[in-house]
Image (cartoon, grey):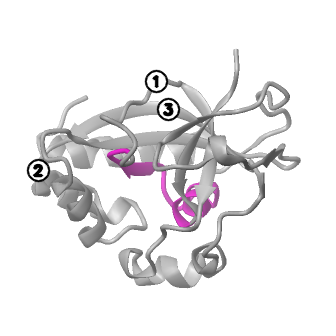
Amino acid sequence: MPEHALKEWAVAVAALAAGDQVLIVRKGGIGEKRFELPHPRFYLFPTYAHQRPELVKPAARERFGDPLAQREDPERLPLAVYAELVGAHPIADPDALAAIDHLHVLTPDYASERLRWRRKHPLWAAILRVWRVPEPPVLAVGPEHGGCVSWVELPAEIGAPTGRVPALDDEAFARAAADVEAALAAAGVTG
């Protein structure tokens, strides 16, 4: 079965890999009818071209300046972060977004903008358990990996990683995931 990769802004991938967050907020790309989370485990595919520094919180702009400063998607991309989907919650209102604002690096403006886009579809708050891959496979990025889509099927030679290192230990991850769940529950969001 082929591996897949989820496209995400490089600054968010860096924050996940550093253990600064366990949450992503997604609605999908222009090339998709709706965003789905069909894969339980996947690589994260950092994207650079569409990142907007003004939509990243100031502390994260400073901490993750290198991936945020890069403007071009590379021709060869190390897949250095692997994730497991632990939970996913649909968000349909601004109060729920406000409840999780402190749990990710993106500004409230980014989240609100995504919530308003394609209003009939929810924004997804996805909790990810993340590992760094010390010897990452390198993807030769081709036209088949481009476009405004969330998921990329990887070539057969890229399998599941070995020797991965957790971004957070079990206890720290459990606390961080519980914080997300509690914030969403307090805002009336259930899985």
Mark 1 and mark 2 residues within 8 Å of each other at the beta carbon: no
Q: Secondary structure at mark 1?
A: loop
Q: Compare residues 32 and 98 and report the one nearer the observer.
A: 32
Q: CA distance from mark 1 to mark 3?
A: 10 Å
Q: Using the numbered discs, state the Cα–Cα distance from disc 2 to disc 3 in whole angstroms.
A: 23 Å
Task: Name the residue: 73% across, 49% down.
Answer: 141
Nearer mark to the viewer, of 1 and 2: 1
36 in the magenta segment: no
Q: Position of residue 108 (x, y in %)?
A: 25, 69
Q: Quadrant of the N terminus?
A: top right
Specify the quadrant of the image occupied by residue 31. Answer: top left
Q: Identify residue type, mark 3.
A: Leu
Above or below: residue 93 compared with residue 74: above
Q: Specify whether residue 169 is in view.
A: no
Considering only order in the chain, which callout, 3 or 2, is on the residue closer to the N terminus? 3
- Residue 57 in view in this figure: yes
Q: Are marks 2 and 3 in contact (CB under 8 Å)?
A: no
Name the residue beneath numbered marker 1. 38
Residue denoted by label 2: 93
Mark 1 and mark 2 lie on one chain; the one further toward the N terminus is 1
Specify the amino acid type for callout 2.
Asp
**Foreground pick, 179 / 32:** 32
In the rendered structure, the answer to whether residue 172 lies left or right of residue 137 reads: left
Residue positioned most to the top: 1
Q: Which residue position holds label 3?
A: 85
